[in-house]
Image (tube, coloured by chain):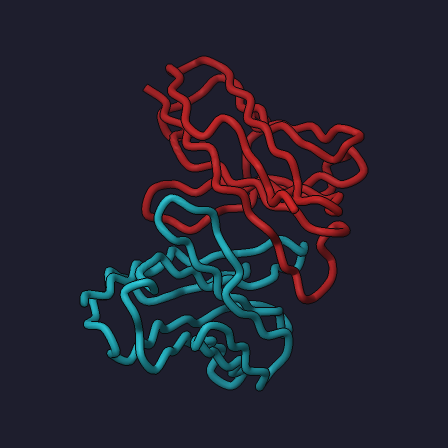
């Protein structure tokens, strides 16, 4: 049973460029959430996708956008990259939009983005 | 808004020592509480959880009790092993359903 898979694992971009990160959820899961984890910090919620729509969004600018495909996989796009966007980007999947109180999420290993 | 505060690390212990990592939270109502662990080079894994006051979550020898009086969810283990070396994150389920994490505590266990 494949867990959450993310690609690429590492990438380097320069300021002003655009980046796309990809995530395949755990088998049987239909909801994908994205988190940003800066060095030495805890993950921060970016947004959540369910039924191909953005359902919830954290405090991130519009430069951060996403998409969910019919097979439940998801992409995170970041435009006009800033140095401060350097971080580990984590994808998490769950069954349902995450409103259950148990709230268990399954995380991928992340994509480490470095912006120079 | 909702937030989680956990003790800063790094924490360095000898094998078989007792571990406590403090975690307190601020939230409306009684959110579900979690401890996640991040081993080197791996993603976050759920370690344990508690969904209501006085619940005790436990897994792999780790325990944490949901204390609404002190708004705390401290992580404990009676005898740590080298393999427990990792970063530990306390988290709560926010009002929107997303997870809100603390900054993490790095634990190093020496043989």
Residue A3 drawn above or below residue B13:
above
Residue A19 spot, x, y in % from top left: 51, 19
Q: Quadrant of residue A6?
A: top right
User: Position of A50 compared to B13: left or right?
Assistant: right
The residue under the point 62% across, 69% down is B31
Count of marks, rendered view = 0
Locate residue A28 relative to residue A39 in the image: left or right: right
Which residue in the rendered view is the most extreme toward the front? A1
> Quarter-wise, where is residue A4 in the image?
top right
At 32% from the left and 47% from the top, the residue drawn is A40
Residue B73 image point, x, y percent = 47, 75
Q: Tell which of B24 and B90 is nearer to you.
A: B90
Q: Position of residue A101 (x, y in %)?
A: 69, 66
Seen from the viewer's position, the closer of residues A13 and A56 is: A13
How far from the left and from the top, in percent, is residue A28?
75, 47
In the picture provided, is B59 more to the left or to the right than B19? right
Chain B is shown in which shade? Answer: cyan
What shade does chain A have?
red
- Location of the C terminus of chain A by quadrant is top left
Residue displayed at 36% across by 57% down = B87
The residue drawn where x is 63% and y is 40% is A47
Classify A17 as above or below A69.
Answer: above
Relative to the observer, which residue lies in front, A32 or A4? Answer: A4
């Amino acid at each position: 049973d494949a867990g959450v898979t993310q690609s690429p694992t590492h990438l380097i971009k320069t300021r002003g460029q655009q980046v796309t990160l990809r995530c395949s959820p755990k088998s049987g899961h239909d909801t994908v959430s994205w988190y940003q984890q800066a060095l030495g910090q805890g993950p921060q919620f970016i947004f959540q996708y369910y039924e191909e729509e953005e359902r919830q969004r954290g405090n991130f600018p519009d430069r951060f956008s996403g998409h969910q495909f019919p097979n439940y996989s998801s992409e995170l796009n970041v435009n006009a990259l800033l140095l401060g966007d350097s971080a580990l980007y984590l994808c998490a999947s769950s069954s349902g939009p995450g409103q259950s109180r148990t709230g268990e999420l399954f995380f991928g290993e992340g994509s480490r983005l470095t912006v120079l | 808004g909702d937030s989680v505060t956990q003790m800063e690390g790094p924490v360095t212990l000898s094998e078989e020592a007792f571990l406590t990592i403090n975690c307190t939270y601020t939230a409306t109502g009684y959110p579900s509480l979690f401890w996640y662990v991040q081993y080197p080079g791996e993603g976050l894994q759920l370690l344990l959880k508690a969904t209501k006051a006085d619940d005790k979550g436990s897994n792999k020898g780790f325990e944490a009790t949901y204390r609404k009086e002190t708004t705390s969810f401290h992580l404990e283990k009676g005898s740590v092993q080298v393999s427990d070396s990792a970063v530990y994150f306390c988290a709560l389920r926010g009002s929107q359903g997303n997870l809100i994490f603390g900054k993490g505590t790095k634990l190093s266990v020496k043989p």
